[in-house]
Image (spheres, helix red, strand yellow):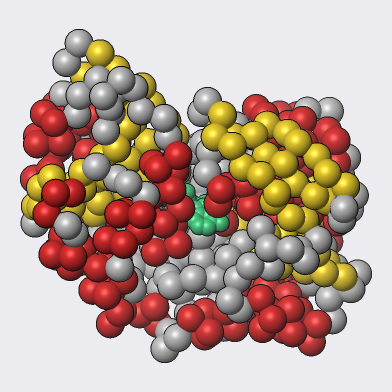
Amino acid sequence: MTANALQDNHNLWTAYEAAAATGGALCARGGDPKEWAAEDWSASGVSIDTRSLKPGEIFVALRDARDGHEFLKNAFDAGAAAALVARAPEDAPEGAPLLVVPDTLQGLRDLALAARLRNFGKRVGVTGSAGKTSTKEILRAILGASGNVHAPDRSLNNQWGVPLTLARMPMRADYGVFEIGMSRAGEITPLTALVRPHAAIVTTVAAAHLEFFDSIEGIAEAKAEIFSGLAPGGIAILPFDNAYYALLKKRAEEAGAAGFVTFGEKDGADIQLLDYQPDGAGARLTASFNGERRTFSAGVPGKHQALNILAALAAADAVGADFDAGINALALLQPAEGRGARIAIKVGGGEAILIDESYNANPASMTAAISLLAAAPTGDGGRRIAVLGDMLELGPDAPALHAALAKTLVAAKVDRVYAAGELMRHLWDALPPAMRGLYAGSAVGLVGPVCDVVAPGDVVMVKGSNASNVSAVTRALAAGDEASAGATEK
Ligand SMILES: Nc1ncnc2c1ncn2[C@@H]1O[C@H](COP(=O)(O)OP(=O)(O)O)[C@@H](O)[C@H]1O
Ligand SMILES: [Mg+2]
């Protein structure tokens, strides 16, 4: 079976199964079901957002900034099969099938738990300061060579996204892949308890979300929470080179992990990256797997992605997937939008390369992206240009962390830096004058100048936190003009 076989999923939840899972009451608003039968529906999926709800899905009315109960009409207009609600608002369509529970988030968690208990596949949980989504996609490819994989399409990694992903897991999925994120201590514990991974990966620990932490050690402790949910016999997969490796390992031991696999570049890692060579849009990797040396191609560039790949291979092995088939699948990987995708762009009579890293940024991923730029071959007379927006949510160290990039950029022999945002001012001031392209208060101010300066043969890497809006620059470069720069953020 192929991974796509899972998309044909008409009977994900019948009314009775959903009611049994949640302990909720099946009813129809108004008591006189016309078009719908209150107890005779089945749903092909689960949604918490009426804007992306597909016909046939259960709509879960959660309370966030707004109350999902206000959107019941939209949900049924969009074709919802039923709604999981805590009350039936006046404007809910007459006769609409409802599943009523005291608390809808708990209802979603109950669906998630039931989905897990009725599935006999293996689950992998991924956390880390960077690389969660990348590793999830790598796992989708590797595990997809051995069976049906269920994984979220987007970065669904928080208190809603994780139960939602699990509630969507088909009964016959062979593997489930879960991205588990956090912005505060204590958030991962209930999520990993719900997922109960057979293999849990910490990709890396680095400065990110420092606003809610006093130290990076605090972040390491919070990431290590993932091990508390390991299924019996579960394996911890640990970043050997990381400064907090010992701490992570200790926490995994305390949590009762049945085994450990380490990945990294340093001698002593169980899975060690021995050689990394950029190769076209991807890379050629040589790694030692417990002493066995293998060389293989990967479709995604960057040493950071190579390390994500090694972590994913360790997890795939831990859950019994076919190792060789997994390695072969790596050659077909494609970088995701905003995460290292390479795009050939047309500029004044020739071509330049855009490395689109605009999806997000923190010091670890920024350093990784700068090394991607350093390793990218330029054309005749081409230059390496970095277009950088603020790295947000870094707390009081933010100015110093921005200024520190100057050294990294110099070491990487980047030719020109374009910087935008209040925090990037600190980098700008620290840069050698010869490297300075232009500074602007906001990313929009860089769009025109960057489009003008890029010449045939150049390689341009664009990166910043999502809210820094540097994606305006990638959109304009990719479109070959400034026309698309005003489009809304992705
Ligand atoms: N292991 C890693 N170490 C450092 N940076 C990484 C790593 N993996 C991915 N990145 C970079 O971090 C950014 C976010 O990647 P992503 O996989 O979306 O992470 P997350 O889901 O954890 O936010 C991208 O720019 C990506 O290239
Ligand atoms: Mg993510």
Give the residue displayed 70% in from the left and 49% down from the top.
274
Instruction: Say whether residue 134 is visible.
Output: no
- Where's residue 106, x and y in %? 61, 72
Give the residue displayed 49% in from the left and 71% down from the top.
206
The answer to whether residue 108 is left or right of residue 339 is: right
Q: Is residue 185 above or below residue 425?
A: below
In front: 274, or 462? 274
Give the residue displayed 25% in from the left and 13% down from the top.
350
Q: Quadrant of the N terminus?
A: top right
Q: Is residue 179 above or below residue 485?
A: below
- Where's residue 320, x and y in %? 90, 49
In front: 337, or 238? 238
Give the residue displayed 83% in from the left and 44% down from the top.
293
- Where's residue 105, x and y in %? 56, 69
- Where's residue 199, x and y in %? 79, 62
Instruction: Say whether residue 238 is visible.
Output: yes
Q: Is residue 319 above or below residue 106?
A: above
Q: Quadrant of the C terminus?
A: top left
The answer to whether residue 122 is left or right of residue 409 is: right
